[in-house]
Image: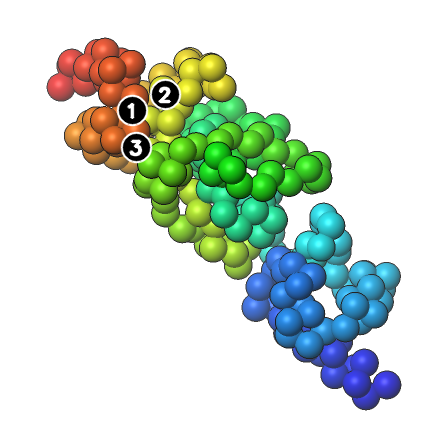
Amino acid sequence: MALITSQRDKLKSLFEKRPILRARELRAAGIAAETIARAVDEGDIDRIARGLYQGADADINADQNLAEVAKRIPKGVIAMVSALAYHGLTDQMPRRVWVAIGTSDWAPTSTHPPLKIVRFADKYLKQGVAYHEISGVEVPIYSIPKTLADLFRNARLADRSVAIEGLRSALDQRKTTPSEIAEAAVAGGAWKVMKPYLEALTAHG
């Protein structure tokens, strides 16, 4: 009984530090599977996906799904419309989490939260990644200039109007500069298609 109590206390302490944890992280910390199962049954933690748990009293923000995805896909990066929404540059709330992975990386098949997988070549996958803490998780999310470049380059994946809206919002809100956008567009293979839009939106300046 003392061992079980000790494990439950440790489990509670772990979730106080990090609201979302994978089963393998809990096991690595010495928490037995039986302790995890009992904590779920008694409502102390919630099983939010296969092998993924959240503290029942966790203070979760609106970007919770991004943190869950970062846990499930360690090599992935929040991208495209989801990155645009995170940066506050679109009114659209994507029904799926857009996540970029490598051309040969494993793609999960589970459905919570729903995913939109996009595959980027290495030269695009590693550009413009920044880490943001969400619900105690370090989440890789593409920067604003990189996100805009990806949206313009991948018109077949996301509607062009979303890219234009994002570009206009980024400039209006001064969250990045025309030169930073242009630099990312050149590096991201999107300059040819983005150039006329950027020039039109900055012509008044």
Residue 146 lies, with reference to residue 69, above or below; the image says above
Residue at numbered disc 3: 145
Q: What amino acid type is highlighted by mark number 3?
A: Pro
Q: Residues within 10 Å of mark 1 (few under 14, many from 20)?
A: some
Circle nearer the N terminus (3, 2): 3
1 and 2 marks in contact (CB < 8 Å)? yes
Q: Residues within 10 Å of mark 3 (few under 14, many from 20)?
A: many
- Picture coordinates of residue 159, whole percent (x, y): 47, 14
Residue at numbered disc 1: 189
The C terminus, quarter of image: top left
Residue at numbered disc 2: 153
Q: What amino acid type is highlighted by mark number 1?
A: Gly
The N terminus, quarter of image: bottom right
**Horizontal side of residue 71 vs 37, given as left or right:** left
Instruction: Measure the alpha-carbon separation of dots 1 and 2.
Output: 7 Å
Circle nearer the N terminus (3, 1): 3
- Picture coordinates of residue 4, whole percent (x, y): 81, 81
Q: Secondary structure at mark 1?
A: loop
- Of tags 3 and 2, which is closer to the observer? 2
